[in-house]
Amino acid sequence: MKRNWMKTSATYTLAKDGHADAKHTFNNLVQNVSEDQIKQFGVILAELSGAKFKKATLSSTDTLDAE
């Protein structure tokens, strides 16, 4: 079987005192996105929104092809 990467998405969870957590999903990330890139983007989102960056959830889709 041959594994082929198709896509990666990230859902960022941000929290603000007195408000429910906000989730923002970004699709079509590069194949080998690093932990540092994920963290840095979360910090940027937090600065822009005035909320606290809580976590990022990554989701990748691959296919398995019979050879």
Image (cartoon, helix red, strand yellow):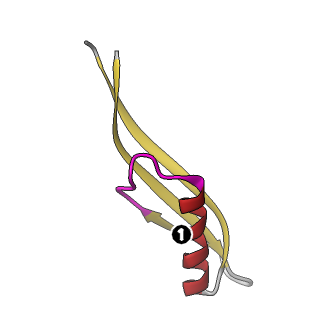
Please name the residue shown 55% across and 86% down the image: 48
The answer to whether 63 appears left or right of 52 in the picture is left
The 10 Å Cα crowd at callout 1, few under 14, some 14 to 19, many 20 or more, is some
Q: Quadrant of the C terminus?
A: top left
Picture quarter containing residue 20? Answer: bottom right
Which residue does the numbered mark 1 point to in the structure image? 41
Up-down relation of residue 19 to residue 3 (above or below) = below
Up-down relation of residue 66 to residue 24 (above or below) = above
Image: magenta residue range: 26-35
Up-down relation of residue 11 to residue 5 (above or below) = below
From where the camera sits, is residue 21 visible?
Answer: no
Q: Is residue 27 magenta?
A: yes
The answer to whether 65 appears left or right of 59 in the picture is left
Q: Quadrant of the N terminus?
A: top left
**x, y (%) of residue 23?**
54, 68
Please name the residue shown 55% across and 77% down the image: 45
The answer to whether 67 appears left or right of 19 in the picture is left
Please name the residue shown 38% across and 58% down the image: 27
**x, y (%) of residue 15?**
67, 75
Please name the residue shown 69% across and 81% down the image: 16
Q: Nearer the viewer, residue 22 or 42?
A: 42
**Would you say the magenta stretch is mainly helix, strand or loop?**
loop
Q: Is residue 12 magenta?
A: no
Picture quarter containing residue 21? Answer: bottom right
**x, y (%) of residue 4?**
33, 31
Amino acid beneath label 1: Phe
**Residue found farthest to the right:** 17
The answer to whether 19 appears left or right of 30 in the picture is right
